[in-house]
Amino acid sequence: MTSLSEQQLEDLQVFLKDWLRHTGRTQADLRRALQASSIRMPVLLDVLQHTYRQQGPVGLAERLCAVEERWQQEDGAPVLAPGGIPQADLGQLDLLLQEIRADRHS
């Protein structure tokens, strides 16, 4: 797989900051979830860049969805039923993953 472009990395950074703000989480929370060596954004982006190189956009989206699911479970949200979350309850990352999968099959 190829690496994310500079523009894609910038977009990912903006997305991560908005996501963290929206979910009430910190870069330290994301560091723990990604098992990164530092809370610094460049290190977090490197971890995600590595995921993208190995697994592509779907793998990246799935990894971020797994982080969101973990956080929801930590917050006492119900555990997901087999087959996923009901459409009305889909999080931002789940919608992104669905869109990426749909693009791959087009």
Image (cartoon, rainbow, N blue to C red):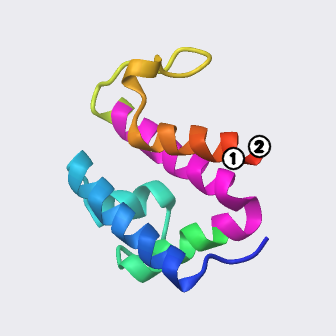
Q: Using the rendered image of the protein, determine whether residue 37 is visible from the camera's viewpoint.
A: no
Q: Which residue is at 75% across, 47% downward?
A: 104
Q: How many marks?
A: 2
Quadrant hosting residue 88? top left
CA gap, disc 1 to disc 2? 5 Å
- Out of 33 and 12, give the one closest to the viewer: 12
Query: Main structural element of the magenta stretch: helix, strand or loop?
Result: helix
Residue holding disc 2: 106
Q: Which residue is at 43% across, 82% downward?
A: 42
- Out of 99 and 3, give the one closest to the viewer: 99
Q: Which residues are magenta?
A: 51-72
Q: Secondary structure at mark 1?
A: helix
The image shows residue 83, relative to residue 42, as above or below, that is above
The image shows residue 22, relative to residue 86, as above or below, that is below
Q: Secondary structure at mark 2?
A: loop
Q: Amino acid at mark 2?
A: Ser
Q: Position of residue 50 (x, y in %)?
A: 65, 71
Q: Are marks 1 and 2 in contact (CB under 8 Å)?
A: yes
- 10 Å neighbourhood of mark 2: few (<14), some, or many (≥20)? few
65 part of magenta stretch = yes
Q: Using the rendered image of the protein, determine whether residue 81 is visible from the camera's viewpoint.
A: yes
Quadrant where the C terminus lies? top right
Q: Which residue is at 48% across, 69% downward?
A: 36
Quadrant where the N terminus lies? bottom right
Q: Position of residue 92 (x, y in %)?
A: 40, 42
The image shows residue 24, relative to residue 71, as above or below, that is below
Residue holding disc 1: 103
- 10 Å neighbourhood of mark 1: few (<14), some, or many (≥20)? few
